[in-house]
Image (spheres, rainbow, N blue to C red):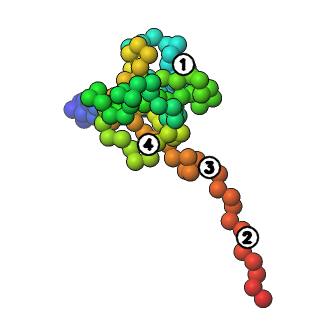
Amino acid sequence: MKSRLRFTLALTVAAVLGGALLYFSIGGALQTYVSPAQLLKDPAGQVYRLDAIVSQQPLANAQDQAYTPQGLRFWVQDKENAAARVQVVYTGAVPDAFKATREVVMTGTRQGNVFVAQRNSMITKCPSKFVNQPDPPAPTKKS
């Protein structure tokens, strides 16, 4: 009787731990990725993962550009529609690859017409890693 109780208890603990592992491993993957155009249509206050291109266009006011006490301020634009833009306020470490025309992903919320990114949530995508490389030439026979 004791061995059956121990087995049931061990099986229950394993099932709970397995469920917790599954929940935490895919939890971040369940967040919705949005573009700037989609972000502006959705209600403010929800948490989103913004996937966009860093715009080359500077902010309207020179004093609002770059680093402010609130954080780094810049524009991002939609991949397909450059006219769909949203201003971003970001705090935390800025990746080395961050620059205009680079694709970035950030987690945060929309407050009015501004996307406020969570601290240290910016990831830059390196385009060279996603471009198909040509196959190397076939080796030639030496005579």
Element under disc 2? loop
Q: For residue 131, which numbered disc appears in the image?
A: 3
Which quadrant of the figure has residue 134?
Answer: bottom right
Q: Observer-nearest residue: 74 or 120?
A: 74
The answer to whether marks 1 and 2 mark residues whose Cβ atoms lie closer than 8 Å is no
Element under disc 3? loop
Residue topped by disc 4: 98
What is the distance, in whole Å, between disc 3 and disc 2 at their CAs? Answer: 21 Å
Q: For residue 138, which numbered disc appears in the image?
A: 2
- Residue found at x 55% / y 50%: 129
Which quadrant of the figure has residue 133?
Answer: bottom right
Residue topped by disc 1: 38
Relative side of 128 to 46, left or right: right
The image shows residue 15 at horizontal and vertical percentages of 35, 31
What is the distance, in whole Å, between disc 1 and disc 4 at their CAs? Answer: 23 Å
Q: Residues within 10 Å of mark 3 (few under 14, many from 20)?
A: few
For badge 3, the amino acid type reads Val
Q: Residues within 10 Å of mark 1 (few under 14, many from 20)?
A: few
For badge 2, the amino acid type reads Ala
Q: Observer-nearest residue: 73 or 121?
A: 73
Which callout, 4 or 3, points at the residue further toward the start of the chain?
A: 4
Q: Observer-nearest residue: 55 or 15?
A: 55
For badge 4, the amino acid type reads Phe
Q: Which numbered disc, 3 or 2, marks the residue closer to the eye?
A: 3
The image shows residue 122 at horizontal and vertical percentages of 40, 36
- Residue found at x 48% / y 23%: 86
The answer to whether residue 12 is visible is: no
Element under disc 1? helix
